[in-house]
Image (cartoon, grey):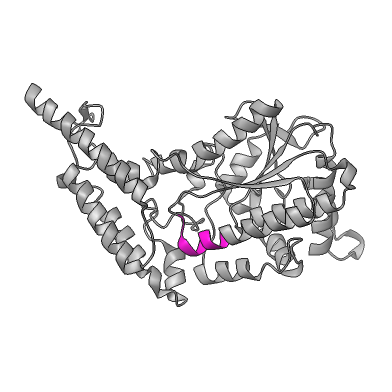
Amino acid sequence: MSKNQLNSLRDTVDSTPPATSEEIFNQVVADVRDEYLSDTQSFPWIVGFSGGKDSTLVAHAVFAALLDISPSRLTRPVHIIANDTLVESPLVVSHLHQSLEELRNAAETLKLPVTVATTNPNKENTFWVLLIGKGYPSPNSTMRWCTDRLKIQPTSRYILDQVAACGSAIIVLGVRKDESSSRRRSVESFQNDVGTRLHPHKELKGAYVYRPIVELATDDVWEILASKAPPWGGSHNRLIKLYRDASGGECPVVMSHEDAPGCGTNSSRFGCWTCTVVEKDKSLQGFVDSGNHQYAPLITFRDWLRGIRNDLSHRQGRRRNGKISIMDNGKIIPGPFTLDARRMILDRLLQTQNEYGDTLISDQEIETIKRIWATDLIAIQTQGENE
C-alpha cells in the first residue's frame, strides 16, 4: 500500500470518519493482488516469515489475495520461508513451526501455489559450532557474527537459488516505517522505480523487494490481526498471547547486512535465546514471569556466557589464522576462546540442557565441535614447536 493511498483512507476532511482496520486491510489485499498479477508474473515471490505480527499480517494478506484470484491466473509461485537459527527462543520457535504447518496444510487444501520452507545455518556455521568449536567470542554490538551466518547466509542461498532458476525473484517483506527510527531511515533510503512497487535488493543481484504494509502503523497491524481470522483457520490469538507473555517485540526478518543492526536490539527482542548482544533478554524473562519457569536455566546460562566474554583468561592471544592483532594503544586484541574455555562452555551448556529437559545442542554439533578441537590442538602444538 502506498503512503498516498493510506493517507486517503485516513483522511478526515469533511468530517468523514477515519478509515477502519477493515478498509485498510482490504486496500493492502487489493495492492497485493494487483502486484501478484503484474507483468513480473514469471518471477516467484519469496515471503519472509518470522512468525511475528508483521510477517503474519503479510502472509494473511497474500493468502487472502490469492483466494481472490481465479485458479487459472495463479501462475506465479509463492514461497513462504522462515529462518530457524536453531537457537531461537523456545516458545517463539514452537509458535513458528506450528504456524508454518498451518500455512502448509492450508495451501495444500486450498490448492494455492504456495511452498512453505525453513532455512537453517550450514552445519559448520551453527551458533554452537562457531562459539564452542571455533571459539568465536560471544556476539556483541560490534562483533555480531551470528546474524550473517545464522540468518542472512541461509536465506540468501534460498533466494539466489530462485533467482538462478527463474532469472529474478521478488522478496515480500513485512517491514514498516513505524517499527523504529532506524527502520524508517532504511526504508526511505530506497527509491522505488517509477510505476512499480518494487525496488532492487541492495545485496542480492536479481532480487527485488516488495513491502505491502510499509505505511501501516503498529496499531493498524494489531487491530487487523485481532479482528480478522486467518485464511488458514483459527485465529491470531496464539500470536497475540505470545507477545503479551513476552512483553516485547520480535527480531525482524533479516535479509541483508543493512537489516542486521535490527537483530538483537532492545526494541526487538524475540530472537535467539543465546543472544548476548542485548544486556538483558526481556522477552525470555517475560515468559518466565508469565509462569514458564522451565526457561529460567536458559536465562542463567545466557547471562553467564555474556559475562565471561571479556575475561582475558578465557581468550587466546592469537586469532584463528595465527596472527596477533594490536590496537593503536599497543594492547593486544584478544582472539577466540581458549580450548579450556570452550570445554567449560560445553560442560555448562550440557548441564543447562539437563536442567531444561530438552535438546539445546545436537549430537551432530558436538561431534563437529570435537573434530574442530582436535584440529586446533594439533595446530597449537605445532605452533609451539615452531616457536
Work out whether residue 271 or residue 221 is closer to the camera in this orientation and state it. 271
Q: Is residue 90 magenta?
A: yes
Q: Residue at x 63, y 58 (%)?
A: 101
Work out whether residue 48 or residue 81 is closer to the camera in this orientation and state it. 81
Whether residue 227 is visible to the viewer of this picture, yes or no, is: yes
Judge whether 55 appears above or below 165 on screen. Answer: below
Work out whether residue 196 or residue 65 is closer to the camera in this orientation and state it. 65
Q: Looking at the image, which residue sits at the far bottom? A: 291
Quadrant containing the C terminus is: top left
Q: Residue at x 72, y 36 (%)?
A: 44
Judge whether 345 appears above or below 293 on screen. Answer: above
Whole-percent x and y of residue 266?
A: 46, 56
Q: Looking at the image, which residue sits at the far top? A: 386
Whole-percent x and y of residue 20?
A: 82, 64
Left or right: 318 as drawn, with respect to 356:
left
Left or right: 344 as drawn, with respect to 245:
left
Q: Is residue 369 magenta?
A: no
Whether residue 7 is visible to the viewer of this picture, yes or no, is: no
Query: Magenta stretch?
Result: 88-96
Whole-percent x and y of residue 376?
A: 21, 34
Left or right: 244 as drawn, with respect to 57:
left
Whole-percent x and y of residue 118?
A: 57, 47
